[in-house]
Amino acid sequence: MKKLKVILVLLVVLAVVMSASALFARGGKEPEPPEEKAAPAKTEEPAKKAPPPEQILIFGSSGDAVRLDPANVTDGESIQRMDNIFEGLVEYKKGSTEIQPALATSWEISEDGKEITFKLRRGVKFHDGTDFNADAVVFSFARQYDTGHPYHQFGEWAYWGYMFYDVEKMEKIDDYTVKLVLSNVNASIMTSLAMFTVNIVSPANAEKYGQDMFKHPSGTGPFKFVDWVKDDHITLEANENYWRARPKLDKLIFRVIPDASARLLALEVGEVMGIEYPNPADFDRIMANKDLKLLTEPGMNVGYMAMNSGYGYKDANKSGIRDPDEPLVKTPGYYEPLTKKKVRQAINYAIDKKSIVDNIYKGTASVAKNGMPPFMLGYNDDVEDYPYDPGKSKQLLAEAGYPDGFEVTLYVMPVSRPYMFDPPKIGEAIQSYLAAVGIKVKFYQIDWGTYLQETESGKHQMCLLGWTGDNGDPDNFMNVLYGPNATSIGAAGNYGFYTDEKAQELLTAALQTFDINKRAEYYKEVQEMIHESANWVYIAHSNQNVVFRTNVYGYSLHPTSRKFFYPVSIK
Amino acid sequence: MMRRFINNKSALFGLVILIILILSALMAGFIAPNSPTPSPPDLHNSLKPGFWSKDGIQGMPLGTDALGRCVLSRIIFGTRVSLSAGLVAVGIAMILGIMLGVIGGYFGGWVDSVIMRFVDIMFAFPALLLAIVIVAVIGHGLDKAMIAIGIVYTPQMARIIRSSVLYIKEMEYIEVQKAIGSSNLRIIFRHVIPNSIAPVIVYGTLMLATAILDCAALGFLGLGAQPPTPEWGAMLARSYSYIVSGAWWAATFPGLAILLSVLSLNLLGDGLRDTLDPRLKT
């Protein structure tokens, strides 16, 4: 009994201490002074001494890479590491999605638009010492589309299916000339070629490691791969022979810190020198700290809630398009109320998006009314968003035959993404808004991999998701996310299962049109149609935010959220 | 006996707290200043401090959480969720435990061996881990979490009741019953169970505390109560990331509520043991 009492006393003391420390943590002022002294001492003092110290930049990432093979990933964490290891034939200009030469020095497009001939850069070497040449380019492409290629079996090549299905083949003309042959005219192909998917990998390295190649990346980029400790860090070092010039950083380390608060604390004490995805609620604290700088700009993304309108098709021959013998069938998540346009519109009227953006995103996003960001070609600003109007919502529900509402399941993402930083909170807000018009929302949460599989198979009634643009082309939003061809059950990208055939005709026509104004008109019309059908509640276009310590220079945000550290230096 | 309990200060303290908790659970609707799940939500009230700050909102003494809901009201309604979850879980454990323990203890032999070896196997798993496995199989949700925790606690109950039964079935009054030809069922329900229930009550009180804690843990992991249910563990899980941003109240108060309820039940359970255990009599 006495022992127990001692334990109890200890417990109470612990509770008091904990709540007291929480009180102090509130302003964040108490622990700051020692940090301010410690951090500059670490970084600035040695910089004045004669032999320049190693420039090491440690970046705090929210998750680990999945694979380090550029053609075989879809996640941002893998991509941001490989952006510094690999390069493509063309690349994006700083801060935009316009392209400029990279490993190709020039190119020519044939008159019918179906053949593009590239002149390759000479004298470039891969990190493993082998030469970059036409064989490497053909290898990097052919392994993705050629099912008979010996390295085809080692990947899923998901992005090839999303973006490059119009590519027929890549041919070698001579050692430093290649020709890309398309099966259809594709207005977005040149910008797509700057994507990570078609970065050039070393064939010799692939031969050496076979199916383990993704653990030992070897490209032509400014940094070389050194080591990877799973869920801890990935180290890269400067490529002394980089064809432009050696990068200023000696080492670039990506450390994994999943918790946003822990990431910020690590940055404040100088353990890392930059972080991604800061919590919007911490912005005041970041702004008040003169050792930190916040880089922010509107992101090329959209976060939405999709409502499954009930029908998709089974892509029996895996062609990626709906053939005449592939009829529309009910999706597994078919739910009577959501098949009615009035119900979907009612849900749009019932949610106060502005309040969500102002108070949950804390103003780090803008309210979305269309499925792609406002600065892109073909954005339809004439679409009038559904205003927040619960009365109108109830009236529409009654007209649709549900005056007392209904119960519905909402898939809520378990992870923060650039387009939606805290899905459970947004889900809960939507839940409360819909409760006010009589719709009872049940949460469904499951791990991220399964979540994507189930939503791609149309098992959801409603789901939260979003998209970050890859190449700055409207097709990368409109066709991938809203095209009826993307309602294939099991591989859907169109999670609202919007199946209007006319929309697909317009989208396909748009992709094959080079006249910018005409293309824009097609996309605008489709946005109008999607707005009317209301399969999505577009919530927000999030800003992309990165925080660095003030002695890190030269980093600039890229609209695609990719992270290029080549120009960065530490002073 | 009553006096001994009253003289035990810490037990009395536990009882008082528990009574307060029970009252707030029963009358949550009257006590709570605001709705725990306002609809539509008042998002503009997000993360406002409470009475200690002049930025606070009138009528929300413990501040608001990220969705602008009154933390105090959610804690009060959360009492209802946590206490009833604990009670149901312990109830399930008691029913299953008494069944297994009495059958094993009373009949003995191979029946006893089978049941007790099964119970031993259950003991091999850490409690929370086993609960997570069960929830993973039967699905998420508060009701499922209660069942899972009930199953997890069954072996402990079964062992305790079995040891009492082993002792009681050798008593002379049981022999008398057997001699006059009473059926086993009658002996078990009229004599064995009523006489072996005392340790179960003490143990049940202590178990209630851990059941509440485990329920909160499942809620914290997102496997227990589903939103918007105001459950303490889930409240904690959704707010702790704001401690760094300065909004410490949204996570601290639900944590303190868990601490208080568990503490009060432990103190009460200890007090009851001191009172009921004849060996501790002075």
Image: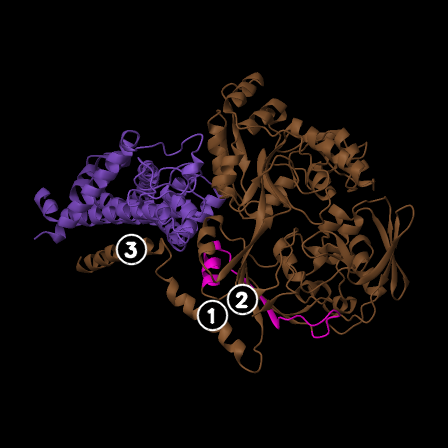
Nearer the N terminus, badge 2 or badge 3?
3
Amino acid type, label 2: Asn
Position of residue A412 measured from the top left corner of the image (x, y, whole percent):
53, 41
Tag 3 and tag 1 share a subunit: yes
Quote the CA–CA distance across marks 2 and 3: 34 Å
Quote the CA–CA distance across marks 1 and 2: 9 Å
Label 1 marks a residue whose chain is A
Q: Look at the numbered disc 1 and give the secondary structure of its residue.
A: helix
Q: Which residue is mark 3?
A: A20
Q: Nearer the viewer, residue B139 or A294?
A: A294
Disc ID at residue A551: 2
Left or right placement of residue A489 versus residue B242 in this view: right
Label 2 marks a residue whose chain is A
Quote the CA–CA distance across marks 3 and 1: 30 Å
Image: magenta residue range: A240-268
Foreground label between 2 and 3: 2
